[in-house]
Amino acid sequence: MLLFIEQLLNGLQLGIMLFLMSTGLTLVFGIMQVINLAHGSFYMIGAYVGATVALRTDSFLLGVLAALPAAALAGMVVETLVLRRLYKKDHLDQVLATFGLIMFFNELTRILWGRQPLFMDVPAWLSGSVEIIPGVPYPSYRLAVIAVGIMVGVLLYLLFTRTRIGMQIRAGASNREMAGALGVNIRLLYTLVFGLGTLLAGLAGVMAGPILAVEAGMGESVLILTFVVIVIGGIGSIRGALAGALLVGLVDTLGRAFLPILLRLFLSPAYADGAAASLASMSVYLLMAAVLVWRPKGLLPAHG
Amino acid sequence: MTVNRKTIAIVAGALLLVALPVIAGLTDEPYLVTLASRILIYALAAVSLDLMLGFGGMVSLGHAAFFGIGAYGVGILSMHAFEGTVLFNWPLAIGGSQAALTVWPLAVLFSAAAAGIIGALSLRTTGMHFIMITLAFAQMLYYFFVSLEAYGGDDGLSLFARNTLPGLDLGDDRQFYFVCLAALALFLFFSWRLVHSRFGMVIRGCKDNERRMKSLGFPTFRYRLVCVIIAGAGAGLAGALIANQTEYVSPGLMHWTRSGEILVMVLLGGMGTLFGPVLGAATLLLMEEFLSIYTEHWMVFLGPFLVVVVLFAKRGIYGILAGGNGNHG
């Protein structure tokens, strides 16, 4: 039971990371109709910049503060230079160009930082653990990640429903020409939305730094999980991204933790571990397939 | 067949490919034959992808899955043949095999079956969803093979020898090269017949306007699915060949960047043409070889190059070479 609660929180924490990644990406998909494979690169940029600054200054917070603008800025530059030219092209071109961007960014980080992964330490004030319920200690860093994720979720909700720019973004999403005709600067808006998306990806990256190794290509594994989240949740839908992210986070974490135990009830231990490992690594994709059969448009599609 | 730029380009290319082992022998660069075999194998994979991508309008970012399954088909059967163990006990006892005439069709069959399942699920969606879903399924298979410890897991499987083909010695690089060339030529011929058949017309019709094809009474889903299965089978054959060439299979063969590379080959060469992907495969692999002589960080140049190709050279290399009507293979 205690293990279960711990794993539940781990799943929640992975879900929060995926939520930060998928919100930005689902906005770009839904609003600009662009498929952006390079989203993981901004996660990587956030992690690298954050890790470098944190290692130099010995301050994790400064690392986070540096990572956010770096990722947002990189995102806006890429949007202006490349993606802006792809809005009118078909998805295939977007795939190819953003694939090229991934190659470029991965290799660039290898040139700048070398092939050795960077390791970031959890800041001292978050390195302890908290007893959530008596007898269950849980690392406070992971709890902080969950808290930050929830905070970002609330802020995004307020941004989209309560502010003028949020209204413009929603207007731009449902009808680009109409919003433009009513005086919204769509170009600028798109750049800002893209920057917001990459900022969130950078945040996810820098927060993942102390948990995972910071290395070139780290963005891709999370990118594909993000795709799964978006397919499950429905393209362009932030609520869908939240639901999908939590679902994927929980299924993946709990699957890895409990499938071996579960399968040992039916199979011999040696065989059960192998089968459980295979099944656990496939679980989120099987979940996606199931959602797809049941609801091809995702659980909470953006428009109707 | 009238003599135009297209015919000249194709004939010149074919002559070059046939003469290549001789040239490699004369210039004493046996490595050329290995490289060229690799190009032919990837060209086969790229042509198969182009069937669904260029002609069927289905943008798949998971084609390497079928490539990898074909390769693993060879690897797994070879391992069982070597160890003298059986693959299955039920319902039939199936042992390993080294005979190309048994193993290759089986590898193709495995890939086609996987394409059937993945296709049936993915084709429920279109556009952006389809791209992401094919990608996700391919990654699923990638992780499946990574965690498959019985067959090497992450480290992959080494073959103890290439497959055997009666009358030929596949262990000889030159003979193997001609087998690859024959496989590619046969697949190109098959694809050419396919594209110009009624089936091909329906598939191309679905690309342009699926709704209209539906109202004309065509069961478009079934046509598309068959197209995906054929494409998967072609990639499976390419996978079987690459396993033989490198005598090694690993999950890396089906990593999503591999799918991306195959996609790049198709686009670079010119999609919706049959010879374009062949040119694209040659160009990409030669560029990799060439750039890696000068710098280990060649990707930093290749990446922006791709962006530039997308932004400025839409029709691909074949479109430029063949001039005017390079549209339908």
Image (cartoon, coloured by chain):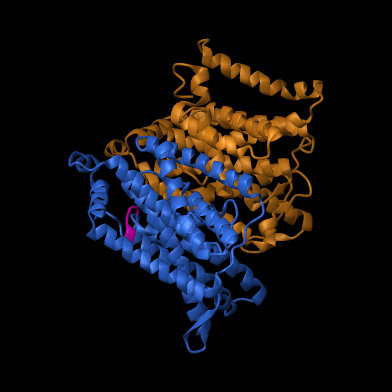
Identify which residue, A259 or B113, lies in the foreground: A259
**Considering the image in quadrants, where does the C terminus of chain A appear?**
bottom left
Identify which residue, A203 or A92, lies in the foreground: A203
Residue A2's x, y, as percent?
A: 51, 84
Task: Write down which chain is painted orange.
Answer: B
State the residue lying farthest toward the top.
B3
Residue B239's x, y, as percent?
A: 63, 43
Q: Quadrant of residue B206?
A: top left
Prevalent SS, magenta region:
loop
Which residue is found at the position 51% from the left and 70% from the top?
A253
Identify which residue, A289 or A5, lies in the foreground: A5
Which residue is found at the position 51% from the left and 85% from the top?
A136
Task: Write down which chain is painted blue.
Answer: A
Magenta region includes residue A238: yes
Q: Is residue B251 left or right of residue B230?
A: right
Which residue is found at the position 65% from the left and 76% from the top?
A269
Residue A160's x, y, as percent?
A: 27, 57
The answer, for residue B57, to whether it is visible in the render is: no
Which range of residues does the magenta coloring cover? A235-239
